[in-house]
Amino acid sequence: MSGQRLKDAALPLFAEQGYEGTALSEIAKAVGIKTPSIYAHFASKEALFLEIYRDVMRHELLMLQEVVQEKHATMEAELRAFFYKVTDFGVNSQVKRFFQRAIFFPPQSLAKQMREEMMTYEAMTSKSIGEILGKKLGSAQKEKWVFLFYCLLDGLSLEHEIYSQEDFAKRRDAAWESLAALL
């Protein structure tokens, strides 16, 4: 039994049921161990959840760094690739759902710590966007564009849960067109 196997089993449970709705006994059952055996790998349910949260943030940052490192014909093409990558909620859907739930509904006992870590993640993401935008926009325009980017990202993350794939795709395309018009 490894800590990674426990995290792999816990992530979809936390993604679907939330922190409060997931019992350690469910995670133990999913990997075929008794609940107390989890404590050989994680000090608490909070520690397990927080480690998964950090893994997911690292995964998301690596994914975005890949987009930035790719060759794009134009700044707009690079921003478009970035936008569509972060709003592709169908890829790694359990990871995305976990991340959404953790951001919007963090466990009360971890909320402050997770919010601080999220601000670090957002600052790193904003820096990547800013570097791309720096090629064309001034600092005031750049900041407004990044704010709008996050508003659209947050809205689309919720719309993905509400609308059909077809309707979501139309909304995402409209969001990008509106954002691109500001470049």
Image (spheres, grey):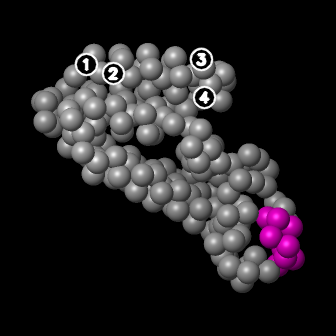
Amino acid beneath label 4: His
Q: Which of 22 and 114 is in front in this view?
A: 22
Q: Are marks 3 and 1 in contact (CB under 8 Å)?
A: no
Instruction: Give the magenta part as a residue range.
Output: 27-36
Task: Give the CA separation, mark 2 to mark 4.
Answer: 18 Å
Which secondary structure lies at badge 2? helix
- From this view, report whether residue 2 is shown above or below residue 76: below
> Element type at marker 3?
helix
Q: Where is residue 162 in the image (x, y as percent from the top left)?
A: 66, 24
Q: Are there few (<14), some (14-19), or many (20+) residues within 10 Å of tag 2?
A: some
Label 2 to label 3, Cα distance in Å?
A: 18 Å
Amino acid type of the residue that numbered disc 2 sits on in the rendered structure: Leu
Q: State whether residue 1 appears in this view.
A: yes
> Where is mark 3, residue-wise?
167
Task: Read off the residue under disc 4.
Answer: 160
Q: Residue at x 68, y 57 (%)?
A: 11
Q: How far apart are marks 4 and 1 (CA)?
A: 24 Å
* Mark linked to residue 182: 1
Up-down relation of residue 109 to residue 15 (above or below): below
Q: Is mark 4 on a helix, strand or loop?
A: helix
| 3 or 1: tag closer to the N-terminus | 3
x, y (%) of residue 139?
15, 33
Question: Residue type at mark 3?
Answer: Asp
User: Disc 1 residue type?
Assistant: Leu
Do residues under tags 2 and 4 come within 8 Å of each other at their CB atoms?
Answer: no
